[in-house]
Amino acid sequence: MNLVISDIHSPLTRTWLKLGIASLIAAGIFSLLLVVSRTPGVQEVIPWIDFFHTALVVHVNLSVLYWFMSFSCVFWSIYAGKQYLIFEKIALILCIIGTIVLVASPFLGAGKPLINNYIPVLQHSLFLWGISLFSSGVLIQCIRALSILPKTDDISRLAPYIAAILSLSAFIALFVSWLNLDPEIENLSYYEYLFWGSGHILQFSHTCFLLFSWLLLISFTGGNIAASPTVLKWLFVILLLPLLYALGIYLNHAVFSAEHRTQFTELMKYGGLTSLPIGLIIVWSIFKFRLNKSTETDAAKAALLSSIVLFAAGGIIGFLIHGVNVVIPAHYHGSIVGVTLAFMGIAYYLLPILGYRKPLWKMARVQPYIYAGGQLMHILGLAWSGGYGVQRKTAGAAQGLDTLPEKIGMGMMGFGGLISIIGGVLFLVVMIRSMRGEKAVNPNIS
């Protein structure tokens, strides 16, 4: 199973990848401020704790929404090829402008952060314009992909199409929530309920691309998949089942209701089981078939194994959530980093396909382990501290780190965060070095 590259319109696909990389660079700058502001011994000298929440809003949106959706657009760009290019150009322009506006907004007066779930918000028109422009671009790219029916026996084309259906459903859910919410509702509650349903649905799209990336990484290592294309086809179709439950939630419960929230929480808990069969096939394939060992394939293996470990750790920690504490970010950080590691691995192998110089494999094969190791320490520190009641979305003295176990946990969180930043920087070094180097000659790139 391989990506179809014969009809890639490389300039646009490359630009989508660059946009995702740019989002990570900006997110990394904000994440450094976040880690420092929560690390014991350093937090006391940080004079701008109020900026912590503003930086948190921008960091979360860049490192999750913008990075994930930019990479989704990479997949859709490859999938759609040269068809309806004018719409892809419009989508790309909107996303680029939206990214620039979002990054600039905190320095141009945007403040009053709302730390709601999924898409936290700065209460400023500039920030909202940034989110709106980027989302509009993603929607256009998503619809463009959906306009081209896939060959159902080709997983490399079916999986991106399934993800596009899930993403479009998230946009529809967002629109329905917007229609049914009273704008006079208190701001935090308004945005919490506005993004609650669509945010949950969008996670299934991310999961679809995660599973697809794992399959591709196995292929890059020379391994085989322990399932037939027909079986995989139907297992990817099963990923759409949570949409039926989501439809039932919107039909039976008001958007601004406790039932709406609790039912989507249940959907996330049990709807995620639809991805378990493919996940088990992937794990079984790793054990059953020996993966090739070479300088080039080691990077794919590192990204694959690291991604699986972090995603699994995030899922396990999710069962430990009780109350509102830092166990919650430990859970979703694990899941998010699992997706990020898979995308990082795919990015390395896209470089020569898109006409760039091959990555520095020696660095590429250790980078996932460094990044994953730091993030694992980060989330375990959060989970440890959460067990002692350290509250989420706080910084500085507001964390209330009074006991030694609390300080140890958050210290481990801070140290792990710094290690993961090193791993993130290594990824950017590898990518930028290849992108700025002499481009490879590839007859498939037009």
Image: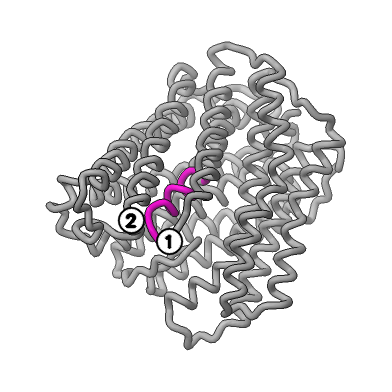
Amino acid on which disc 2 is placed: Gly
Residue at 52 percent of width and 67 percent of height: 132
Q: Which mark is residue 389?
A: 2
Left/right of residue 133 with respect to residue 235 in the rendered view: left
Q: Alpha-carbon distance for marks 1 and 2?
A: 9 Å
Residue at image location 74% in from the left, 69% down from the top: 247
Q: Earlier in the sequence, mark 1 or mark 2?
A: 1
Q: Residue at x 53, y 64 (%)?
A: 133
Q: Nearer the viewer, residue 274 or 30?
A: 274
Residue 89 seen anywhere in this rendered image of the structure: no
- 84 horizontally vs 70: left or right: right
Q: Residue 292: image x %, image y %?
A: 64, 13
The magenta stretch is: 323-335
Q: Quadrant of residue 245?
A: bottom right
Up the image or down, 411 lies above or below 186; here it is above
Task: Please state which of residues 182 and 434 is positioned toward the viewer in this rendering.
Answer: 182
Q: Is residue 325 magenta?
A: yes
Please give the residue where the numbered disc 1 appears in the rendered image: 323
Magenta stretch secondary structure, dominant: helix
Q: Quadrant of the N terminus?
A: top right
Residue 353 falls inside the magenta stretch: no
Residue 157 drawn at (x, y percent): 77, 41
Quarter of the rendering occupied by the C terminus? top right
Q: Residues within 10 Å of mark 2 (few under 14, many from 20)?
A: some
Q: Which mark is residue 442?
A: none
Residue type highlighted by circle 1 = Gly
The extreme top residue here reads 294
